[in-house]
Image (cartoon, grey):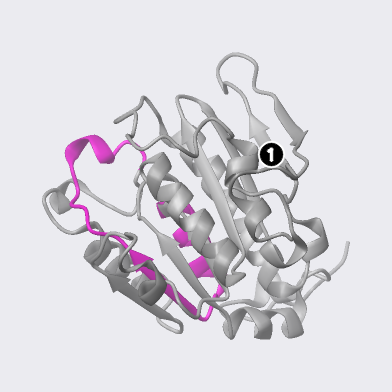
């Protein structure tokens, strides 16, 4: 049996991993990530990024905590109902890791502010509640050359993929060609912590892979999807070629 002789330091267990190590941890500590939303998928994702030691995390969240959030949004408690999601999320995450910078912006990402709010980040975690919001971030990232991950869950299903504009990978509209014109959200959907935590962990893995140098292993031009955890419980990789005639990214991938 290998004896690693772990010391009692915050990152000792991941530093001992041969695919991680000190040099990659230093890359992570210098990274600046924007996370849009602090809901079910994002609470798991944010917890993972915080514990791993991403140097700067900025959360964009304008909503308040409701009782129906608590079955899956695991950063919040019953006593938090009615309070700001962003404020409580930052407080809890700072308690997990006070050695990094965690900030909150109380704003909705919209057409007139997206350029100002999302400027300068190394990576963005997309989290719009509507197709319009997701397409807005997709277009901004294509325009600015900023990589992003999209992770989502509903019922006991979920999926994740990453878009890297500099590599001219398939964009959100390539994956969902029927959604890029859709404006209205479908509203609240059935979902549990089982699927949101899996999707959130996969999304966090994408962020960390990009930041520490495993960019060739990202979920680009493909989607990792899992089906019903109660029924089929299947995980699959579905390839998605970039649509050369995509009405969105073809404008940027000349």
Q: In the current view of this chain or complex, which residue is farthest to the right?
A: 1
Task: Give the quadrant of residue 186.
Answer: top left
For the C terminus, the quadrant is: bottom right
Q: Residue at x 41, y 31 (%)?
A: 192
Q: Is residue 103 above or below residue 242?
A: below
Secondary structure at badge 1 equals strand
Q: Is residue 224 magenta?
A: no
Q: Nearer the viewer, residue 239 or 49?
A: 239
User: x and y percent of residue 12 in the render?
Assistant: 66, 77
Query: Which residue is disc 1 drawn over?
Result: 224
| 230 relative to 39 in the view: left or right | right
| 106 relative to 129 in the view: left or right | left
Q: Residue at x 74, y 31 (%)?
A: 236
Q: Nearer the viewer, residue 26 or 117?
A: 117
For the N terminus, the quadrant is: bottom right
The boundaries of the magenta stretch are 43-72
Q: Is residue 59 magenta?
A: yes
| 154 relative to 72 in the view: left or right | right
| 151 relative to 18 in the view: left or right | left
Q: Residue at x 58, y 49 (%)?
A: 248
């Amino acid at each position: 049996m290998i004896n690693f002789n772990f010391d009692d330091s915050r990152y000792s267990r991941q530093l001992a991993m041969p695919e991680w190590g000190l040099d990659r941890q230093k890359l992570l500590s210098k990274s600046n990530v924007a996370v849009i939303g602090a809901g079910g998928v994002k609470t798991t994702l944010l917890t993972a990024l915080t514990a791993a030691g991403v140097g700067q995390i900025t959360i964009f969240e304008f909503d308040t905590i409701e009782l129906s959030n608590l079955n899956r949004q695991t950063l919040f408690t019953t006593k938090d109902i009615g309070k700001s999601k962003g404020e409580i999320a930052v407080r809890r995450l700072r308690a997990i890791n006070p050695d990094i910078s965690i900030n909150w912006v109380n704003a909705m990402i919209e057409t007139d502010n997206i350029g100002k709010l999302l400027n300068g980040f190394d990576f963005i975690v997309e989290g719009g509640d509507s197709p319009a919001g997701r397409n807005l971030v997709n277009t901004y990232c294509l325009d600015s050359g900023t990589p992003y991950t999209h992770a989502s869950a509903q019922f006991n299903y979920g999926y994740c993929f990453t878009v890297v504009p500099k590599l001219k990978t398939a964009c959100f509209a390539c994956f969902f060609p029927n959604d890029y014109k859709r404006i209205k959200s479908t509203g609240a959907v059935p979902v549990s912590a089982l699927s949101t935590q899996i999707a959130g962990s996969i999304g966090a893995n994408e962020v960390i892979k990009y930041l520490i140098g495993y960019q060739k292993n990202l979920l680009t031009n493909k989607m990792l999807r899992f089906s019903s955890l109660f029924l089929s419980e299947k995980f699959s990789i579905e390839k998605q070629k970039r649509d050369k005639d995509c009405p969105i990214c073809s404008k940027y991938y000349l």
